[in-house]
Amino acid sequence: MDAVTGRFFSWSLCLALVPATAQAADERKIEAALPAIDKLFADFQVDSHAPGLVYGIVANGRLVHVKGLGVQDLVQKRPVTPDSLFRIASMTKAFTALSILKLREQGQLSLDDLAETHVPEMRGWTYPTKDSPHIRIRDLLTHSAGLVDDNPWGDRQTPLPEADFTRILQQGVPFSSAPGSHYEYSNFGFALLGRIVANVSGQPYRRYVERTLLTPLGMASSGYEISEWPVERRAIGYRWEDGRWKAEPAMRDGAFGAMGGLQTSANDYARWVAFLLSAWPARDDADDGPVSRASVRMLAEGSNFVTIAQRNGASGPSACRQAAAYGFGMRIAQDCDLGLTLAHGGGYPGYGSHVMLMPDHDVGIFVFTNRTYNGGAGPAWDAAMALQKAGALVERALAVSPLLAEGYATAGRIYAAGDVGVARDRLAMNFQMDSELDSWRRKLAGLKTEVGACQSDAPIKASGGLSGSFTWVCEKGRVSGSILLAPTREAQIQELKLAVKLP
């Protein structure tokens, strides 16, 4: 792809990142929406005074579009490309969270372990009240460990030597609240998770992530120590202050790398996005990623400190209020238009970034910039809405289970016979208690009088392994219906709804 013009990848150039499940996103409609989306990011780059920017769209397991704007550095003026290296700040937290979940998967720790079990220096800490529970690993993952919000301070701690971090832990830290009582964002907490990864795995945090996640995913240009890559490849970080750009110091890897130190490129990061999206839906095919699909889906487990939030971007304030919570290294929200979303911003001295995933549609959008705290959440979410309005976001269809298929076939036999009695053995014990057989006969007779015979072999749309909805085309109209099976061994029908479908 031409990173300057931003032309859409042709099929021959499309980078296959992971084996895709059944395609959900409509890639032709994505292509049609690209001019408007390119303008969103171009305007953002100019308006936010970002020297450079790169953004990408991942769909159906592929990086289908990527575009670089501006320059990596203001001296040599090297253009931003899909291989330019950016620090992605707090988007690193998902890598840390998944490392913890990998260790859990291997039986090396539990999310309900006390953090002090794996970080002995914490055992002498003084908690804010006598009834305060001690910090669990789960509390650190969900920012509910009682530690203070520390973005301005924490961002500058990346190069802190491990020995200095150990001394801080030995001294103990003040608490903002009792652990487990509410959400408060903590970079210090994720630095603690990095120490847990190191102590449990027996290797430095960065090495564990590189060997466990980055290398298996083919992310060969990603890592924590920026000095290991030539400066010609790096996007140099700047802040915009007093009407001009000022270079930020390049921080080396250290004890706080687990909260925000990862450096990556658009081409590499697209592999990560595709891998995360491939965890949905749960299924039976080969599960050969570096971490199991079940563990990846745990990133979406919220902390239960749910808030009502506005969607990012121009369409948010007037269009959608989200139910949102912090999961494991990701902000989780149910969006009224986009469904389940996982998102995270990255703010850092010299850099800003954002990623948002739509697992229901197998689409992810990310953006990196080289200007301090210039996250890009607005254009990323506006781009998602542009795809939604273009009809490019197609919800992934759930597979119809054998039990649901059998129940659905039974519903067709019932309608054809005009009597639920023909399927007594397929009805759960509550079915006839909720509505008598004679009542069902009258209802079915009324439906058949109004619409006639129906083609009851139309596909059913599964909403789960034991439930679904359908529409039948009939002689004189249509019938809409839904079926719900019981939690019994035979999965009998506990509820069947049929009604004339209005135009």
Image (cartoon, rainbow, N blue to C red):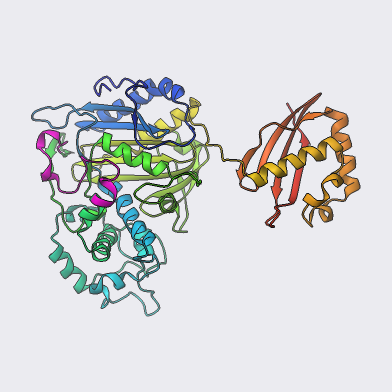
96 on left or right of 105: left
Asked whether the viewer can see residue 184, the reply is no
Q: Is residue 458 above or below residue 170?
A: above
Between 199 and 119, the residue placed more toward the observer is 199
Location of residue 31 (image quadrant): top left
Q: Is residue 262 above or below residue 378?
A: below
List x then y, in percent, for residue 446: 88, 35
List x then y, in percent, for residue 404: 67, 44
Between 418 and 137, the residue placed more toward the observer is 418
Could you tell me which residue is drawn at 12 percent across and 38 percent down? 246
Residue 404 falls within the magenta-colored stretch: no
Between 180 and 364, the residue placed more toward the observer is 364
Asked whether the viewer can see residue 189, the reply is yes
Could you tell me which residue is drawn at 45 percent across and 58 percent down? 305
Between 266 and 384, the residue placed more toward the observer is 266
Could you tell me which residue is drawn at 25 percent across and 45 percent down? 215
List x then y, in percent, for residue 493: 74, 49
141 on left or right of 395: left
Residue 231 falls within the magenta-colored stretch: yes
Q: What are the residue bounds of the magenta stretch? A: 211-236
